[in-house]
Amino acid sequence: MDRSRSSVRYTDRHKGRGSEYHGTFSPEVNPYRAMAWRLEQRALDAILRDHLASRAFSHLDFACGTGRILEYFARHPASSTGVDVSSSMMDVAKAVAPEAELLEADLTEQDVLGERTFDMITAFRFFPNAEPELRQSVFSMLARHLAPDGVLVFNNHKNRNSLRARISRLRRRGTARGTMTHAEVEALLPRAGLRILKVIPVASLPLSDKHVFLPVGLVEPLERMLGGWLPLAGFAQDIIYVCSRAQSRHVQSNSSPSH
């Protein structure tokens, strides 16, 4: 008997999607999602500038999927390692990021990285979709592989308290499956020995890839302006977090979105 989507562990849900998933970030297929990815790259550029000063660095992309992040880091002086559980996704990653080291593994079951640590670890489009216990397990595992002065960069692309989600609840549409709040992020990180250095709102307007009421050419400049306005972070759909080990020498930011 087939299991429902909600009963399937997140690490098993995307195993067969590969090229289909990669295509959803194409401007021709999904202009809004492609725009959000451009905004995320802009944020990553700023993070690299602020925390790694364009020097050579080691990079781990957890749940690397089809290699979007790995392909982006190929433009920078980074040695990148990607880890994912999906063979079909890794096949695409091999094509788009041929220079990266790719490991097909479930690090929560078998940590094939051993004692290796990395200057930057990224994990995009993973945590909101994952079960709460899986989130905690992964944060703890990634903290072990973070260099003493390294940074962990991840996103919550399904902020449950975003303006769009609030409007949806007001219209009695309920809460979408696989969401996460800033308060949940704040609760998870200290348990893994991590702290937030910076919060970056990426997509603040109450739009989506299924409900774009304005042309992306008009939406993107607005999002670029709003992305630098921290008070909107609590209402953004996509929030990027920059974190460090709790005992690192990084200076902690005082900024934090509303819950």
Image: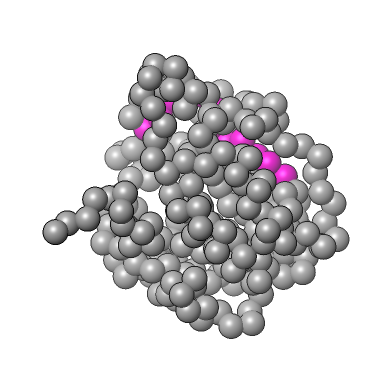
In magenta stretch: residue 49: no
Residue for point 68% across, 33% down: 257
Residue 79 shows up from this direction: yes
Image coordinates for residue 43, horizontal then vertical, percent: 62, 44
Number of numbered discs overlaid on the protein picture: 0
Image coordinates for residue 133, horizontal then vertical, percent: 51, 58
Image coordinates for residue 66, horizontal then vertical, percent: 38, 60
| Left/right of residue 165 with respect to residue 193 in the rendered view | left
Q: Nearer the viewer, residue 110 or 206?
A: 110
Q: Which of 181 and 150 is in front in this view?
A: 181
Image coordinates for residue 113, horizontal then vertical, percent: 55, 79
Residue for point 36% across, 59% down: 9
| Left/right of residue 33 with respect to residue 221 in the rendered view | left
Residue for point 54% across, 30% down: 161
Q: Quadrant of residue 198?
A: top right
Residue 206 shows up from this direction: no
Locate the N terminus by quadrant.
bottom left
Residue for point 50% across, 53% down: 132
| Left/right of residue 77 with respect to residue 163 in the rendered view | right
Locate the C terminus by quadrant.
top right
Q: Which of 173 and 67 is in front in this view?
A: 173
**Vertical relation: 153 (above or below) 145:** above
Question: Where are the magenta residues, as a range?
Answer: 198-209
Q: Which colour scheme is used?
A: one colour
Residue that extends furthest to the left in the rendered view of this protein = 1
